[in-house]
């Protein structure tokens, strides 16, 4: 490629041919056919069961499909493209979050999942009405809606970036087309269509990642070469044991902050809980939980290795410096075209895999939105019971309307930063307070006092306000350069093509980067928004809990002994039952003593 410019190389790598388009279109058609099958051909649910069938599959789904659906729903295109970019830029420190993932599984299994499953809910926010009141349910549903509408546009944008890298087709041309297909099969097929398309999409995700890894590793000279280059550049390293909350990733933020982040994404999120509630028993839900965790960890390891593979491939010619990749999250698609571009159909399989991850997350979000809007916004405020036809219209209209809004919001996401950190930061704004509210409801201190509605609503509102301020300030600080993160070293000395380095000021430079200015960096003063984004969810939850405790003690807390034990986690239930038995025993002793005295 000597004598070529970066634009020439970019065009030469865009080899998305007829067979690739065929593979991609077949994936989309399979999703459409699954939607048509469950929407029009499958035996209709019995009268009165249409809502449960559409939203939770009549609670008769099987463990393996639901587990694969959980993986596909959680591992969006954000993870598939964002994690390799994270590893390429910053090294493997982020991967120590696996400690948080495994810890989350135990906490969810024992404290959170039993409550939802035993109550047989459709919307997780029904719990808030039963535990507090209708206003708390509405508040929780609004927070969920805000979080979902902040997350879904990022989910849509990421695979469009991959498609743009491999084909050159504009992001805003492909986004509406794919979203219309997703809206269609989610709208007509309900949860069953979403789960079974997720099964297909999960297989595609794993297949695409394995294909890239095997062929890419072979091309660079084997596993030993990949690991040696990663070690020499400092990308493979032990856990950072320094306790500094402003460090982007260390063992504490990844494990402690990570467990809370994953907890809010799995334990109280309608997107995930709705899947667990579609299973017939709590035992089945627990099996699905651990199958999900295992599959997710495998996929995370594949994404991590892909990041190391990208560096091994481009260790002498960084594609971000040369602008061969226009955006950070186009690194993996670039590797795919460089590695698989000469094999018709394989780039199409990769793009299908990335879009599968996005479609599964989008369909999950839209299906969950239909459940929340119906159960939490329409039913509680309807003067008369909704007919089956009205219910069907509402559920499907919600999918169509919110899907369209998400497509429009992609325009906003395009202007923001790295998708992995961005999605985790925005998710913490409302999900941190939500986790705090649910934790207040059935775990923390419930055996001592029972938090009032006023405490929960004030705590949630303050937690939300604090998190909005922190996330906005952090995004502004990143955009202005106030917050900058240390990158792992890259090189451009081995590039075989000409490029203009970095900024327009460097237009005379060929295959060089602008010289660094010798100066001692000034450490910025500490500010709360300088902390690692992995602590955001914990801060939102803790602020909510602390404020709720204070307000509840001021206005007067409820008595947990007067409430349904099923509203609390199993270990709290056991405490309450023992206290009630002891109270009855004391009452019998007192009553017996009075009788003896009167006699």
Image (cartoon, rainbow, N blue to C red):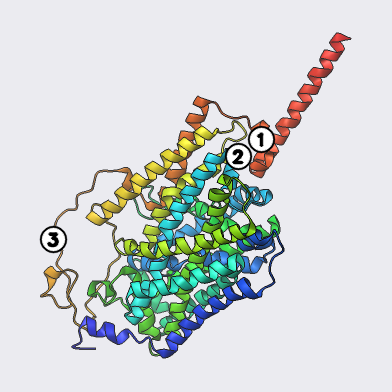
Residue 387 vs residue 467: left or right? right
Quarter holding residue 228: bottom left
Among the 4 quarters of the image, the one containing residue 30: bottom right
User: Above or below — where is 122 with respect to 237?
Assistant: above
Pointer 1: residues within 10 angstroms few (<14), some, or many (20+)? some
Q: Which mark is residue 131?
A: 2
What residue would you read off at disc 3? 517
Give the percent coordinates (x, y) of residue 534.
Answer: 41, 52
Indicate left or right for 582 with 376 as reference. right
- Residue at image position (50%, 55%) is 265
Q: Are marks 1 and 3 in contact (CB under 8 Å)?
A: no
Q: Circle 1 is placed at which residue position?
A: 563
Q: Is residue 104 above or below residue 217?
A: above
Q: Which quadrant of the structure image shows residue 392?
A: bottom right
Q: Which mark is residue 188?
A: none
In the rendered image, which quarter contains the C terminus? Answer: top right
Of residues 315 and 107, which is closer to you in this image?
A: 107
Sequence-first tag of 1 and 2: 2
- What crowding class fits label 2: few (fewer than 14 Cα within 10 Å), some (14-19), or many (20 or more)? many
- The mark lying in front, picked from 1 and 3, is 1
């Amino acid at each position: 490629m000597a004598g070529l410019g970066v634009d020439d190389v970019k065009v030469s790598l865009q080899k998305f041919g007829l067979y690739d388009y065929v593979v991609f279109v077949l994936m989309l058609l399979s999703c459409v056919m699954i939607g048509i099958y469950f929407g029009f051909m499958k035996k209709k649910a019995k009268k009165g069961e249409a809502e449960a069938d559409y939203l939770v599959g009549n609670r008769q789904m099987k463990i393996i499909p639901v587990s694969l659906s959980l993986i596909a729903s959680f591992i969006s295109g954000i993870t598939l493209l964002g994690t390799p970019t994270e590893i390429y830029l910053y090294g493997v420190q982020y991967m120590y979050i696996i400690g948080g993932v495994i810890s989350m599984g135990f906490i969810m299994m024992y404290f959170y999942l039993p409550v939802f499953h035993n109550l047989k809910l459709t919307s997780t926010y029904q719990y808030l009405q039963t535990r507090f009141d209708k206003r708390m349910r509405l508040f929780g549903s609004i927070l969920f809606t805000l979080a979902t509408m902040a997350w879904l546009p990022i989910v849509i944008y990421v695979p469009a970036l991959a498609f743009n890298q491999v084909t050159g087709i504009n992001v805003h041309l492909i986004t509406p087309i794919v979203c219309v297909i997703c809206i269609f099969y989610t709208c007509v097929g309900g949860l069953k269509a979403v789960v079974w398309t997720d099964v297909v999409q999960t297989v595609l995700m794993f297949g695409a990642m394995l294909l890239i890894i095997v062929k890419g590793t072979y091309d660079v000279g084997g596993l030993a070469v990949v690991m040696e280059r990663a070690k020499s550049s400092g990308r493979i390293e032990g856990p950072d044991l320094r306790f500094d909350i402003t460090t982007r990733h260390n063992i504490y933020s990844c494990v402690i902050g990570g467990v809370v982040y994953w907890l809010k994404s799995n334990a109280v999120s309608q997107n995930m809980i709705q899947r667990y509630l579609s299973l017939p028993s709590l035992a089945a839900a627990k099996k699905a939980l651990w199958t999900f965790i295992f599959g997710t960890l495998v996929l995370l390891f594949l994404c991590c290795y892909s990041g190391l593979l990208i560096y091994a491939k481009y260790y002498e010619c960084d594609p971000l410096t040369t602008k061969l990749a226009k955006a950070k999250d186009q690194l993996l698609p670039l590797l795919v075209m460089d590695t698989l571009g000469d094999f018709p159909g394989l780039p199409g399989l990769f793009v299908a895999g990335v879009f599968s991850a996005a479609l599964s997350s989008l369909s999950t979000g839209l299906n969950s939105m239909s459940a929340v809007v119906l159960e939490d916004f329409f039913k509680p405020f309807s003067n008369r019971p909704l007919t089956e036809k009205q219910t069907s219209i509402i559920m499907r209209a919600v999918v169509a309307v919110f899907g369209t809004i998400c497509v429009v919001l992609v325009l906003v996401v395009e202007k923001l930063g790295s998708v992995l950190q961005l999605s985790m930061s925005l998710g913490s704004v409302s999900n941190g307070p939500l986790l705090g509210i649910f934790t207040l409801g059935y775990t923390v201190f419930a055996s001592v006092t029972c938090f009032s509605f006023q405490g929960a609503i004030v705590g949630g509102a303050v937690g939300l306000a604090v998190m909005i301020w922190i996330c906005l300030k952090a995004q502004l600080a990143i955009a202005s350069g106030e917050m900058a993160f240390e990158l792992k070293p890259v090189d451009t000395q081995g590039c075989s093509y000409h490029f203009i380095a970095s900024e327009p000021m460097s237009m005379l430079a060929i295959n060089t980067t602008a010289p660094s200015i010798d100066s001692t960096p000034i450490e910025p003063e500490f500010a709360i928004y300088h902390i690692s984004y992995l602590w955001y969810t914990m801060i939102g939850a803790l602020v909510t809990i602390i404020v709720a405790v204070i307000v509840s003690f001021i206005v007067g807390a409820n008595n947990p002994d007067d409430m349904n034990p099923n509203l609390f986690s199993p270990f709290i239930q056991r405490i309450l039952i023992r206290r009630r038995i002891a109270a009855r025993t004391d009452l019998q002793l007192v009553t017996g003593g009075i009788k003896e005295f009167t006699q």
